[in-house]
Amino acid sequence: MSIPNFYSNMKIYKGIDAFKRLPKAVVTTGTFDGVHLGHKKILDSLINIAKPIESETVLITFFPHPRIVLFPDNELKLINTIEENINLYKQYNIDHLVFLEFDISFSRITSLEYIRDILFKKIGLTDLVIGFNHHFGRNREGSVANLNEYADLYDFRIHEVKPYYLDEKSISSTKIRTAINNGDIDLANNYLGYNFTLTGKVIRGKGVGHSLGFPTANINVENKHKIIPKKGVYAVNVYHGGNKYGGMLNIGINPTFNQNKISIEVNIFDFNKSIYNEEVKIEYVKRIRNEKKFNSVDELKHQLSLDRIVALNTLP
């Protein structure tokens, strides 16, 4: 994992060794995949609890995601990359962000050892902010229910954060992944509190879009764990070189041309630069339709014209 030592005013640590124990630390810990509205409630609580007691805030998270280590055959896909999450953490004015390497050895640490040896002895825990259903330690043995005895032993306060409900439904990273896999970008974005994004480099394609009058940039997502939405056509915003452009994006196999390899191709509106090997960020705004095999190239071109109108009317 490559991360900077500092990001804005937030200090970032790869591992615990460089961390200098604090006199007072308000701590939260978890995977925080997606940094969604439920996580926002926890991070807001972290900041609000720290301010009146003049304490420093510490967010402890893990790399890789524990489920990737513990269930390697499950092929877990993540909502955000580490870099994307760091950009989101920045918005909360957190003082310290600590990445702990998660491996099989770390997974065997008991909840008591985690509290005593890491949070208390190395971080300086005085207040622990924790989600209502968070578990930690070996076999997920540690939970809000059994933290009270640890709090008495090591003299810290527990602040349990209730779930965030949207339309009477609780929010979770699992539900957001399911929505993205189903192509329900509206639901995913509502749960996230921002538009789902992915970042990749522009690579050369087969030039099919250009021949149709809708040139596309083919996007290569290098992080193999990044989740890719369901196949189909989407209205998107594209960020490149500090500028924002509208666009329409297709994820799929281009069945009209009998291709069998999934590609991500975006037609950027009012844009005619060559950007091969350059990075772009794609922000998914709305899903327009399923991918479809057309009977002719003219039929496909007509549909693309309609898709462009829908995208233009959808994008802010």
Image: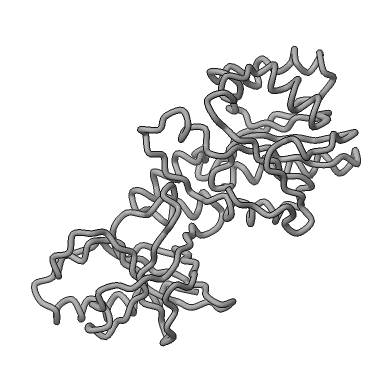
What's the residue at 79%, 47% (across, down)? 95
Rendering colour mode: one colour
x and y percent of residue 172 in the render? 51, 39
How many numbered discs, if any?
0
* Residue, far left: 295
x and y percent of residue 138 in the render? 57, 18
Side of 177 where 47 appears, left or right: right
Q: In terms of image quadrants, where is residue 314?
A: bottom left
What's the residue at 27%, 83% (across, down)? 210
Camera-nearest residue between 277 and 165: 277
Camera-nearest residue between 40 and 212: 212
Side of 263 where 50 appears, left or right: right
Relative to residue 153, is residue 302 depicted above or below?
A: below
Relative to residue 6, is residue 155 depicted above or below?
A: above
x and y percent of residue 252 in the render? 26, 61
Side of 174 where 17 appears, left or right: right
Camera-nearest residue between 284 and 154: 154
Relative to residue 150, is residue 277 depicted above or below?
A: below
x and y percent of residue 304 in the render? 26, 77
What's the residue at 34%, 79% (across, down)? 309
Camera-nearest residue between 238 and 53: 238
What's the residue at 81%, 25% (across, down)? 121
